[in-house]
Image: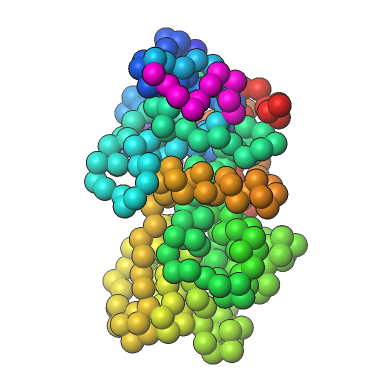
Amino acid sequence: MRAHVLSGSGINGLAIRELPEPTPGPGEVVVLVGATSLNFRDLLIARGATDRIPLSDGAGVVSAVGEGVRGVSVGDHVAGCFFQHWLDGRIEARHHDAALGGSVDGMLAEAVVLPAAGVVAAPRGWSDEQSATLPCAGLTAWNALVEGQRLRPGATVLLLGTGGVSVFGLQFAQMLGLRTIMTSSSDDKLARMRDLGADVTINYRTHEEWQHLVLEATGGAGVDLVLEVGGGQTLARSMACTRFGGEIALIGMVSGQAPIDPFPLLGRSATLRGVYVGSRRMFTDMVAAIDANPMEPVIDRVFAFDEAQDAYRHLRGQSHVGKVVIAVGSQSLPA
């Protein structure tokens, strides 16, 4: 079978190799991968990983099960869990030892072997391309919105940018009856977000002090929750427009690191919570919510398996809205 493997020399070092067909051991399953998707993390990993199959996100069909497997059958349509061993409860250091596409081989292959507990049933009626968007970006947004402070309908969420996490955040916020404010440097992207239902949009290029517009849009109170993906260059502004007792879910560091004054958090009795994807239990909760409240992920573009380098470059260019997907196998809808 074919798989993409990183050589440690960046995107140009990503190449297809022929590898042995995988077979399941006790408690394991083989998944024929139909599609994978990219996250910002994958750009960072590509800079240094060697002899590693990349990408945490993928979905497909179970083709074989090992001895002792219960609850997963041949023919099941599944997605892989980002953290293969974080089933429930608090995250622990050991869970990082089995993070797909990082500490262990990932999903950019025609077939993979995973623990049976490391896969979840995909949403009903979703294709592999759609299901492959969920394991990192979808679950991160779900964790940020649901697993921290309990937000009541009508609460306001600030979403930075229009990448995968933020767009999923918009969709889940609508599912939960929350009001949304979104930022971007592109008026065209903001128009698309309004079409998707964003209540307020702000161009942070033309309004560099965008926190003032957020406060204005909330009557001076500030937002209940921020999905903070920028990091050092945006966190201070996010703190400035979070309400008293609110929460900032720190998800990414796309803009890099910078010294931060924590006093605004103290002064507002606000919470800064680090969010790193989520557990298998959170994943199954998210899928149940999607099944009960039908939605479709926003996919910016789908690349062919042999166009993986182009997919990486497209993500790096930051022109995308939503998820960048790589098709691997059949994309037919599950029965």
Q: Is residue 290 left or right of residue 234?
A: right
Q: Choose between 242 and 191: the one closer to the eye.
A: 242
Q: Is 252 part of what is drawn in magenta? A: no
Residue 312: percent from the left, percent from the top? Answer: 51, 39
The span picked out in magenta is: 68-77
Residue 238: percent from the left, percent from the top? Answer: 45, 74
Residue 184: percent from the left, percent from the top? Answer: 59, 65
Quadrant of residue 14 in the image?
A: top left
Query: Could you tell me which residue is drawn at 42 percent across and 33 percent down?
Result: 118
Q: Choose between 315 and 151: the one closer to the eye.
A: 151
Query: Could you tell me which residue is drawn at 66 percent across and 50 percent down?
Result: 292
Above or below, 194 against 16 in this view is below
Q: Main secondary structure of the magenta part?
A: loop
Q: Is residue 110 visible?
A: no
Q: Choose between 219 and 206: the one closer to the eye.
A: 219
Query: Could you tell me which residue is drawn at 54 percent across and 44 percent down?
Result: 134
Q: Which part of the image, by quadrant, shows the C terminus?
A: top right
Q: Is residue 83 left or right of residue 285?
A: left
Above or below, 186 against 22 in this view is below
Above or below, 121 against 185 in this view is above
Query: Could you tell me which residue is drawn at 42 percent across and 50 percent down?
Result: 277
